[in-house]
Image (cartoon, rainbow, N blue to C red):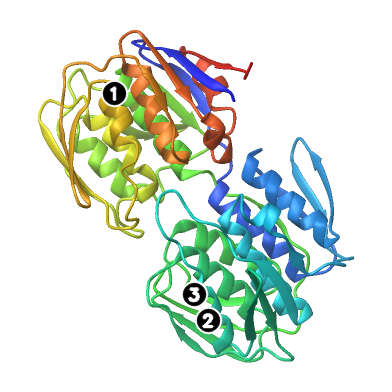
Amino acid sequence: MDKIVIHGGRPLTGEVAISGAKNSALPLLFATLLASGIHRLRNVPRLRDIDTVEKLLTGFGARIVADRNGLEIDAGAIESLEAPYELVRTMRASVLALGPLLARFGRARVSLPGGCAIGARPINLHLKGLEILGAEITLDHGYVEAKATQLRGAPIYLDMPSVGATENLMMTATLAQGETILENAACEPEIVDLANALRDMGAVIEGDGSDKIHIQGVDALAPLDYQVMPDRIEAGTFMIAAAITGGNILLRGCTLEHQDALVSKLHQAGVDVELVAEGVRVRGPQQLQPVNIKTLPHPGFPTDMQAQFMALMSLAGGTSTITETVFENRFMHVCELQRMGANISIDGRCATVRGVRELLGAPVMATDLRASASLILAGLAADNTTEISRVYHLDRGYERIEEKLQGLGADIRRVAAQ
């Protein structure tokens, strides 16, 4: 199993290009199932999760051609309507195949996703919403089977603003008869990106970006030609890389749009974040200031940046509190940061971080995608050598992160499994 080895203590300087957003590209790839023809997606990041979706799509019968600019997906000859457990178990977002297949073909069979290391992420909101639209849902030997002769638009209230359920139901409703209203919908920028793409395909959608989305069903959609938005979580991670090392980095290919909560907290910590003509310039301070954060659905502080911000606060000059409200088990990186000398205590969903003067390199183990990033950030700032194992998590959400960090002057390398 590969590991990442970092010799820390170097301020990062230079420029880095931000990749396309994983959390936008995944639903956009599934949206290609809604329409026959050749779809074109640009700025698609090369990640393990993207590879998994490609395998699912080709398993359905789609033909995919990749080039330097993106992916070409021919969804005209879909033959299978089943997403097998072997693929679904590796990526929970696979359940997003359910709605598009049902909407276009009237049936679908998708394996129930497995457990999640950072907490329960049930799909009951997806299934309840599909039933309201007229689908007949049955569970059979670990699979969800959905059938519908004619989907009909309806008002749907989500018990929580689930991003995945909002995406699945929004895609499904584009081909349902009549109007669907999603209330308490997720407001994340990736929802807006999906809605923009669906509108390009001929869908009629209003209200995305708010908690009430209106979808007027149409008879058919056209093939997609779209560019994936920049990855705001990757951008945020590199912002913290500059801050934690006292560096000076220019982020190309992104703006500060959708980053208000994170940027506000970075400013409070003493980090200089500036929108410039070439992108976003981030400069780390001589001494970080303590900041309290509480994760919330967008536009609140993103849970996907909580672990990275905790690594940053471990070196602040004072005490910070970090409250996690989105997932119930997202502090698994704490014990690994403690191995590096961080002073962190946990009480339920609240972590108290007392800043230390320095972190010390140590062998640590990644437990999930964003925890992996937090350990890399800590290793970049730490004295001596940090070895991070189980880094396959990184490849699910960060495109060539060690190469990008090398380009900024980091002493970091990937060591292949023996």
- Give the spatial CA distance, label 2 vs label 3: 8 Å
- Give the spatial CA distance, label 1 vs label 3: 38 Å
Relative to 233, residue 245 above or below = above
The amino acid pointed to by label 2 is Gly
Residue closer to the observer: 198 or 129: 129
Mark 1 closeness class: few <14, some 14–19, many ≥20 residues within 10 Å:
some
Residue 376, visible in the rendered structure:
no
Q: Quadrant of the C terminus?
A: top right
The amino acid pointed to by label 3 is Asn
Residue closer to the observer: 13 or 336: 336
Residue 55 in picture, x, y percent from top left: 76, 50
| Residue sticking out furthest to the left | 318
Q: Which residue is mark 1?
A: 339
Q: Which residue is mark 2?
A: 129
Total numbered circles: 3
- Give the spatial CA distance, label 1 vs label 2: 44 Å
Whichever of callouts 1 and 2 sits on the residue coming sooner in the sequence is 2
Write the residue at 10% across / 29% down: 318
Q: Quadrant of residue 376?
A: top left
Residue 24, visible in the rendered structure:
yes
Residue closer to the observer: 327 or 399: 327
Q: Which residue is mark 3?
A: 124
Residue 335 in picture, x, y percent from top left: 29, 32
Write the residue at 45% across / 62% down: 121
Between label 2 and label 3, give the one nearer the viewer.
3
Q: For numbered disc 2, what is the local secondary structure?
A: helix
Q: For numbered disc 3, what is the local secondary structure?
A: helix
45 with respect to 14 (left or right): right
Write the residue at 37% across / 47% down: 259
Q: For numbered disc 1, what is the local secondary structure?
A: helix
The amino acid pointed to by label 1 is Arg
